[in-house]
Image (cartoon, rainbow, N blue to C red):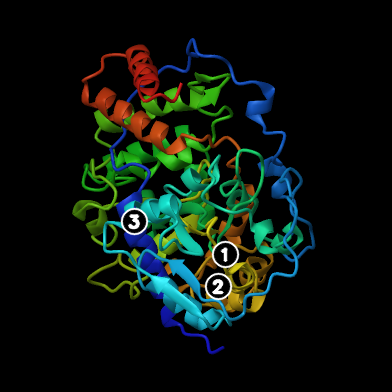
Amino acid sequence: MKPQKIVAMIILTAMAMGVAAGCDSSVTPTETADTTETSATEPSEQSQQSETTPSSAESSETEPGATETVPDGFREVDIAYNLTDEDEEVVVFCFDDTFGDLLSTYSDVANIRTVVPESGTYRDTLDRVLASGDEAPDLFLLDASYANDYFVDDSRTLPVNSLGISYSELTGMFNYTLQLAESDDNVIKGLTWQATPCAVFYNRGIAEELLGVSDPSDIAPMFSDWDTFLSTAGTINEASNGEKKIISGLDDIWRNYTASRTGGWITGGRLYMDPVMTGYFDLAKTLTNEGLTFGTTQWDDNWLNGYNNGTVFSYFIPLWIADLYLNTPAPTDGDPYAGNWGVVRAPSDCYWGGTWIAASTYCNSRASAASIMRDITMDQTNLEDMARNGIFVNNRFVMGTISEDASEARDWLGGQNPAVLLLEVANSIDTSLVCDSERQINEEYMNIVSSYVAGDIESTEEAREIFESNIAELGII
């Protein structure tokens, strides 16, 4: 197959469109809160570290290029052998035409028909055909913002084992991408070719101007923890007379901040407010009251304009967003900010975005569907080509090779190879605390944070009470 470099940018653009349309929350968070515990049940030892998933520390011990098996904890069901359907058409539901381009570049399956529902109707169309079986696809794509809805306790998707795929074939995939595709009984039901670890991409021109240093080794300590981050935010604001900010809006950091919690939202059938989540109220309130952000919302025009207008110091983003908006020509005397970035680790590691491939229970072409999954998510030759065209792929061995390749240094990152840092982050991400209703709870949480920061809610205690009441009204607890 002949690699096509255009595929990488097409995929990046599609991811941006998908996240813009299906982001976990577009609400701007903000507010203060004490770190006292709520009256809700404490997380049990089991909820703090799932018995069925290895900890992030365990998953990050493997060196790039080492051999390993899929981590313990996933339950493998009976594999369907001797599946033959070479003459059957494989129908694939897609967000847009870009996945079809990926298939034509990397898959050897000949009889594929992609279906792209009308813009804005993807989930409605998908849910309708999966409910009736009429015109249901064999395979379909799921955005990270709602993929969990189709994997946890859901009869619409098949275990990958039912396609004839063994877990031994998944060696090298980042554990969090498997956790997010896991059913409530620990069966893997979807696979992805992408990993989307986040890091802090900072502007070297602003750093030199306001902080007197710009090298990653000097900037990294300024993001070592959230207290230090807040101190750095104050320094940047004061040194620029308020013209430059450490981040554009409060929702730039909520994924990273909340990734450090030790207890999930639901424990023992009750809502649990981890001290980290109340701590975010404090951080958001301080950032707002002291004018340390521009108050933007992700994906609005002001947020997008901040990437290259020399006013925003840093973005907590994955490589796919950085490549879309930061990968510009080198700085000039007239513009010292554009294309002049560096990357360091955030105070807490997280992911943002991604697309999973799932098989519907109506799949009539299981062998071919499995071949497509193998071509796109497991074939290391294909994955390495994707990686060399800008995709951070879901394979630690491939990304280990990329991280060791000096030719992968980026001019717009001052000669840094982002894979070196992002590989460490991807290995550390643990999503074992994600619950069935994660998306709904996160959205409501962000609404409460926004109201608190705006002054509509007077105290963190009141915020917690309203939050728990709203979650109960939604029928989640």
Q: At x 46% / y 68%, what residue is drawn?
A: 92
Marks 1 and 2, how far apart at CA: 10 Å
Q: Amino acid at mark 1?
A: Ala
Judged from this view, the residue extending furthest toward the top is: 39
Circle 2 Cα neighbour tier, 10 Å, few/some/many (<14 / 14–19 / ≥20) = many
Where is the N terminus found, in terms of image quarters?
bottom right
Q: Amino acid at mark 3?
A: Thr
Asked whether the viewer can see residue 414, the reply is no
Q: At x 57% / y 80%, what residue is drawn?
A: 109
Q: Which mark is residue 419?
A: 1
Sequence-first disc among 1 and 2: 2
Q: Is residue 57 above or below residue 282?
A: below
Q: Is residue 449 left or right of residue 157?
A: left
Q: At x 22% / y 71%, what residue is drawn?
A: 334
Q: Is residue 470 above or below residue 342?
A: above
Sequence-first disc among 2 and 3: 3
Q: At x 26% / y 14%, what residue is drawn?
A: 458
Q: Is residue 164 above or below residue 224?
A: below
Q: Which mark is residue 125?
A: 3
Contact between marks 1 and 2 (CB within 8 A): the answer is: yes
Marks 3 and 1, how far apart at CA: 37 Å
Q: State the residue position of label 2.
A: 387
Most foreground residue, 381 or 259? 381
